[in-house]
Structure formats: C-alpha cells, structure tokens
Image (cartoon, rainbow, N blue to C red):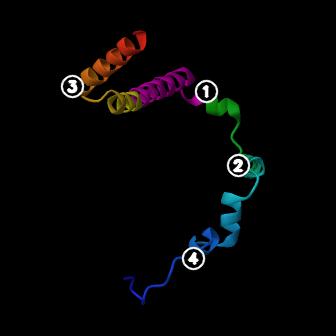
C-alpha cells in the first residue's frame, strides 16, 4: 500500500546524491594518491604565498618566545589527549565485548562444558 503520490528512489547513487557530478567523481572514482597530492600542492603553495607576502625572518619567530616551553606544552597536551582517547575507546570496546558478570559466567560454563565433552 504505497502512496502513489511519492516518487520511487533513484537507482543510481549519482542520481540520489546531492551536489555536482564533479564532487561525486572526486569522492568516489578519483585516484586517492592524485587527490592527496593535489591537496599537498595547494597547501604548500599557500604556505609559500603567505611566507612571501608576509616575510618574517625565522630568527625573529624563534627568539620571540621560549621554544622549549611551547614544544613541551604541545607534547604534554597531545600525550594527555591521546592517552585519554585510547583509554576511552578501549573501555568502550571491552565493555561491549565482556558484558555483564552473569553473562560471562554462563559463557565460561558453556566453554568448560564443551571442553569436557570434547575431551570424552
């Protein structure tokens, strides 16, 4: 009992997806290495353009602040963030795998019964 006023969905992904065909081609069909290389070239060109338009000597950038403190802050921040993320994901995966204690007891009893049957 489908409503006759509604149209059927298109058969092709290209017909269903919003946006241009160029974007769909880049996302689905383009060579990933070429796309990544293109993005790298654009990033490099923009950094070179900013560096040539706003020339600041590297000596000034490195001697203005304390580079050791900046590096240490970045390393500590990234380490804390990384450890927190890894522990959170590990806890999520383990909680899904292990389940409740009663379920684990039943699984263990089943495994032990199977081993006893296989040994006989």
Q: Is residue 48 above or below residue 102?
A: below
The vertical placement of 49 against 2, above or below, is above
Q: Earlier in the sequence, mark 2 or mark 3?
A: 2
Q: CA distance from mark 3 to mark 1?
A: 62 Å
Left or right relative to 38: residue 92? left
Residue hosting label 1: 63
Return the disc, 2 or 4, that comes first in the chain's sequence. Answer: 4
Q: Residue at x 66, y 65 (%)?
A: 24
Quick one: 74 or 3, which is closer to the camera?
Answer: 3
Mark 4 or mark 3, which has the lower sequence index? Answer: 4
The magenta stretch spans which residues?
64-87
Residue depth check, mark 4 versus mark 3: number of the one nearer the observer: 3
**What residue sits right under mark 2 in the picture?**
43
The residues bearing labels 1 and 2 have C-alpha atoms spaced at a distance of 26 Å
Q: Residue visible at 57% across and 73% down?
A: 16
Look at the picture and state if 50 lies above or below 62: below
Which numbered disc covers residue 112? none
Label 1: element kind: helix
Query: Tag 4's secondary structure?
Result: loop
Circle 4 sits on which residue? 10
Q: Which residue is mark 3?
A: 102
Tell me how far mark 4 sits from mark 3, CA to CA: 48 Å
């Amino acid at each position: 009992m489908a409503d006759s006023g509604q149209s059927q969905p298109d058969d092709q992904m290209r017909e269903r997806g919003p946006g241009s065909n160029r974007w769909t081609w880049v996302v689905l069909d383009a060579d990933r290495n070429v796309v990544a290389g293109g993005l790298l070239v654009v990033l490099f060109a923009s950094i070179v353009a900013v560096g040539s338009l706003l020339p600041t000597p590297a000596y000034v950038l490195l001697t203005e602040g304390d580079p050791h403190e900046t590096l240490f802050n970045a390393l500590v921040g990234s380490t804390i963030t990384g450890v927190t993320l890894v522990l959170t994901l590990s806890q999520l995966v383990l909680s899904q795998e292990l389940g409740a204690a009663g379920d684990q007891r039943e699984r263990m009893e089943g495994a032990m019964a199977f081993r006893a049957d296989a040994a006989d």
